[in-house]
Amino acid sequence: MTMLQEKNQNVIQRASERQVVAARDRGVVGARRHVSNEGQITLQRIADALHPALLNKAHLKSVRRLGVTVIGFSRFSPEHQEQGPPTQEITDQIRSTHSPIDVELGHIGVFGSETKSKLGIFLVSKTLKVEEDSIEALFERNGFPLLKGPYREDGYAPHLSIAQLNKDQLEYFQDPVEIEKLETLAGLGPDSTQSITLVKVKADSMESYKLVA
């Protein structure tokens, strides 16, 4: 890359970052459901059970910061970021978003990309799927259709991202046998009877989310 190309790339990057900040200042942010206090206790037990197996392989997130993304910021086009309605204005029009919901904890899976992979727990909930569809449809009716999300081939995949994976350990997490072992440790998987409560939907920039060792 030449110095001119690098300079142009930096200019584009800074412009993009300014647009993101401006969008967030206008309330154009993702829509999430955070985990209730009681649910955090359940997730802390799961994190404690997984911690020894994840040493040097992943960094667990603080359960106080965990939540489910219903609509992610990455689904907003540049035009949406600049001109779209505040997220809360849209979600407030969907009845289900105003109430807590109970969800079942299912399998453990890997989400994200090779550069930013996460360990997550699938959530079983018809309400979350209907809610996501309803918010998506309302954005479209307002003239701002959402971009295709990262998991759209199989439809919306609600999940809790509980840990950030170390880049040099991705092969470990791609092994179904190892994933099954983690599920056994956590009491998750096909026979799981664990559930948690998610609080009402909130427009959330996620800027305060941090990892813990």
Image (cartoon, grey):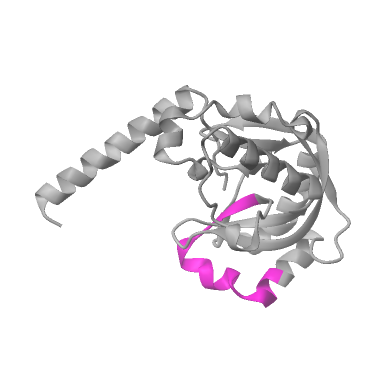
Q: Is residue 163 located in the magenta-colored stretch of the structure?
A: yes
Side of 117 relative to 61 (left or right): left
Percent x, y for residue 144?
Answer: 51, 37
Q: Is residue 79 located in the magenta-colored stretch of the structure?
A: no
At x 48% / y 22%, what residue is drawn?
A: 26
Residue range in magenta is 161-179
Q: Is residue 197 visible in the rendered structure shown here? A: yes
Residue nearest the observer in this picture, 113 or 42: 113
At x 82% / y 44%, what residue is drawn?
A: 196
Residue lying furthest left in this view? 3
Percent x, y for residue 141?
Answer: 59, 35
Quadrant of the frame with the N terminus? bottom left
Residue nearest the observer in this picture, 47 or 76: 76
Q: Is residue 43 above or below residue 33?
A: below
Q: Is residue 44 visible in the rendered structure shown here? A: no
Q: Is residue 5 above or below residue 21?
A: below
Percent x, y for residue 108?
Answer: 70, 62
Q: Is residue 161 above or below residue 33?
A: below
Side of 82 relative to 94 (left or right): left
Side of 48 relative to 205 (left or right): right
At x 78% / y 59%, what residue is drawn?
A: 106
For the image, the number of numbered tags is 0
At x 70% / y 36%, what residue is drawn?
A: 34
Residue nearest the observer in this picture, 125 or 56: 125
Percent x, y for residue 124?
Answer: 79, 54
